[in-house]
Amino acid sequence: MTWWSWIIVGLALLGAELLTPGGFFVFFFGLAALAVGGLASLGLGGPLWLQCLLFSALSVGSIALFRHRLVRWLGAHPERPVDSLVGEVGTIQEPLAPNGVGKVELRGTVWTARNVGPRLLRPGERCRVARVEGLTLMVRAESDTEETP
C-alpha cells in the first residue's frame, strides 16, 4: 500500500471519529494509519504485511495506553454513577403504596421505584430518592424528613 493511501485512510478515520459518538476508538486507528503513512513516505514502512502489523500494533497499543487518559482529560464521559441520584427529586408516575413498587420519572427517564415512606404516593406527587439498590430507586415523599432505615 502506498504511503498516501495510509494518509487518506487515516484522515477518513479521524473524520469518522467526528461523526460517531464512539468515545475515541476510531481516533486512535486514524492516528496509527497516519503514523504508518508517515513512515512509509520516509521509506521506513517495509512490505505491506509489516505495515499492517505496525498499524495494528499502534492502534491497539495507543488505545490501551492513551484512551482512558484522553477521555478523562476531555471529560467526554464524566463518571456519574447511579448512586449519585440519592437526594434528587422525581415525580411519581403511578400510585405507590408503602413498600410498593411503581414508576418514578427522574432526569427525563422513568425508573422503577420502591416507596420506603409511611404513606401512599400519588401520581404527579414529588418524591426524593433515599437510596439506590441496583437500578431500583428507594423513594419517599419529598415532604418526609425522617431517615431511611
Image (tube, rainbow, N blue to C red):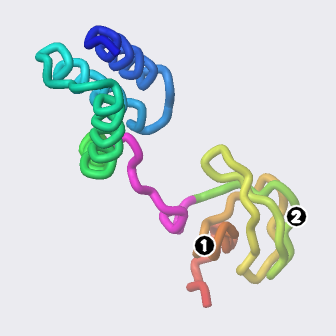
Inspect the magenta stretch and tell me whether residue 84 lies in it.
Answer: yes
**In percent of the image, x 75 and y 73: which residue is there?**
114
Q: Are marks 2 and 1 in contact (CB under 8 Å)?
A: no
Other-residue count near label 2 (Cα within 10 Å), few / some / many at <14 / 14–19 / ≥20: some
* 141, above or below 54, in the image: below
> Please, what is the three-letter code of the amino acid marked with disc 1?
Val
* 66, above or below 4, in the image: below
Overall secondary structure of the magenta section: loop
Q: Which label sits in the foreground, 2 or 1? A: 1
**113 with respect to 40 (left or right):** right
Relative image position of residue 106 (x, y in whole percent): 65, 52
Along the viewing direction, whichever of 112 and 77 lies nearer the viewer: 77
**81 with respect to 104 (left or right):** left
**In percent of the image, x 28 and y 28: which residue is there?**
31
Q: Quadrant of residue 111?
A: bottom right
Along the viewing direction, whichever of 134 and 131 lies nearer the viewer: 134
Other-residue count near label 1 (Cα within 10 Å), few / some / many at <14 / 14–19 / ≥20: some
Q: Which residue is mark 1?
A: 132
Along the viewing direction, whichever of 90 and 51 lies nearer the viewer: 51
Relative image position of residue 79 (x, y in whole percent): 40, 55
Inspect the magenta stretch and tell me whether residue 49 lies in it.
Answer: no
> Please, what is the three-letter code of the amino acid marked with disc 2?
Pro
Q: Secondary structure at mark 1?
A: strand
Q: Which residue is mark 2?
A: 95
Along the viewing direction, whichever of 62 and 71 lies nearer the viewer: 62
* Magenta extent: 75-88
